[in-house]
Amino acid sequence: MSKMAAEGGGKEANEIKTQFTTREGVYKLLPNSEYSRPNRLPFNSQGSNPVKVSFVNVNDQSGNGERICFNVGRELYFYIYKGVRKAADLSKPVDKRIYKGTLPTCHDSNALTATAESVSLLVGFSAGQVQLIDPIKKETSKLFNEDRLIDKSPVTCLKWVPGSEHLFLVSHSSGCLYLYNVEHTCGTTPPHYQILKQGESYVVHTSKSKSARNPLLRWTVGEGAVNEFAFSPDGKFLACAGQDGFLRVFCFDTAELQGTMKSYFGGLLCVCWSPDGRYIVTGGEDDLVTVWSFSDSRVVARGRGHKSWVSVVAFDHCTTSVQDSEAPAEFSGSDEDFQDQVQFNGSRERANSSQSRLSKRNSTDGRGVSVTYRFGSVGQDTQLCLWDLTEDILFPLSRTRTHTNVMSGETSTNGNNSATPSNSPLPRSNSLPHSSGNSPNSHKPSIVDSALIATGVSKFATLALHEARKERHLEKDHKRNHSLSYISNKSSDKLNQLIGTRTAKTDVAKTLGTTLCPRMEEIPLLEPLVCKKIAHERLTVLIFLEDCLVTACQEGFICTWARPGKVGLLSSQNPANSPSGTVV
């Protein structure tokens, strides 16, 4: 991996960075805040599942409310997270578990029910099981899909349903998602299903069981694995990133397809929502980050900076900003001035307030208001990239495009692509008939409610296919040395021709150059504000918190990067000999 990341660069390019600078100031790595296995030795990651990190706030009165959970190989750890305030004490985990026969792949805590005395933590495994544990009480409550009668493939992602104490959603590499209720059992025989709803490239089934049992619902989405899914900030919509290269966005309650996007090449590996729910960012095997407008159902921009597959994308809710002005926001002055200017969301718990504020500001269709979204990405190239999505990209006709971090692509001969205003949605030939993405679906019956009712399933009409075409799985021949980052804009036509030739038997030729998957020269191309090599092994985690951002690599090191002005007490401490990098 180190050799791969080093291609095309000298000695300086191969050095592990311990700080980086943006307009708001300097982000610094805190070596004493590094979390890992207690022995601090690099983990032999060959053939192992990605290291994943999850957080939960237990509202502890002492001020140490954050808890961190991470998996390394067969091991699962749960610690009090001290962040930028105090050094990490790896000798005192709240809970530690070592599994045999199967590996933990992902985990999620229920923020709604978490307290200092109890946390409901879900853990997914490589053999398909899902475990519910309480790491504080050190209890194991339940094991779902224990006999692998529901799905035998690895769990790729799991999350508690927003606002629910009992429901959670699990995706598998089989391409299925299952809705569970923690209060129900799974049964001792394989479940029998009946169709509840279907549409283009997806089917939703409900269990035929007369008694309540898991799973409540089974979603079969696209072809190949569902690599990750994400709920919108309001919990109403579900975005799925598939190995078939498609982003599909559903209304979660009605299971209706709201929009679709196709990757430029290869599978999609990660997905996230903007804090206001207006935009979705994806990353994947095309080495690109892609920004998709949910309300307009179109690709807004692509970002090129990674030299290999993009593992994680995430929005920074603390740096995303809005201002009442005609000019783009200028970030200047001290760190404190910057924080006062743009940080309207002080913690993850205030996400709803930031969402409402952004929605209110954006209701002006971008006129008279300056909007900047900050998001980040990490990849298998061991690099961290930060990106700014500004209004000259979001509203290309309402502003003069002066942003210095945007590379203008070749002028489109069509004229109906990147120059299309955001208030004039492009034709949605790639999705089922539907109204605006932000319209309420309260008049639609909820499939979650219907799954709890043994009778009355027949009243749901099957959705007619908008276009009866079957998507075929892309050939998995994309190698890291075929990275799009090494190919210039001038060769994009040649690349498009090459891809079209390779996959003539697939739908790539049908989608490339459409609103589903615009050509490279048809939309703006972003350049990263920051692009730094920060690890020896591939990066698997990027999480933005109030005072810091958190990254992790496959060696099992979870790193804390203090935001500008947030270094605090740890800045005066003597840095430990960190195995994760060299100070530069």
Image (cartoon, grey):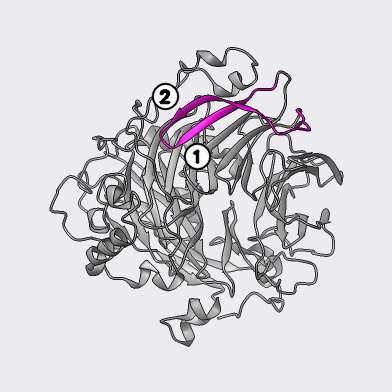
Circle 2 sits in a helix, a strand or a loop, which is it? loop
When the figure is inspected, residue 460 is found, relative to residue 222, above or below; the finding is: above
- Location of mark 2 (residue): 463
Q: Is residue 420 magenta?
A: no
Please say whether residue 317 is visible from this viewpoint: yes
Q: Which region of the structure is painted magenta?
A: 183-209
Q: Residue at x 60, y 26 (%)?
A: 206
Q: Quadrant of the N terminus?
A: bottom right
Left or right of 205, for residue 251? left
Kind of residue at badge 1: Val
Image quarter of residue 434? top left
Q: Residue at x 58, y 61 (%)?
A: 540
Residue 259 lies, in percent from the top left, at 38, 36
Circle 1 sits in a helix, a strand or a loop, which is it? strand
Q: Residue at x 65, y 51 (%)?
A: 154
Kind of residue at badge 2: Leu
When the figure is inspected, residue 194 is found, relative to residue 341, above or below; the finding is: above
Left or right of 582, for residue 110? right
Q: Residues within 10 Å of mark 2 (few under 14, many from 20)?
A: some
* Most foreground residue, 61 or 500: 500
* Most foreground residue, 202 or 69: 202
Q: Quadrant of the C terminus?
A: bottom right
* Most foreground residue, 235 or 188: 188
Image quarter of residue 112? top right
Residue that extends furthest to the left in the rendered view of this protein: 413
Please say whether residue 315 is visible from this viewpoint: no
Residue 130 lies, in percent from the top left, at 72, 43
Residue 221's label in the rendered image is 1
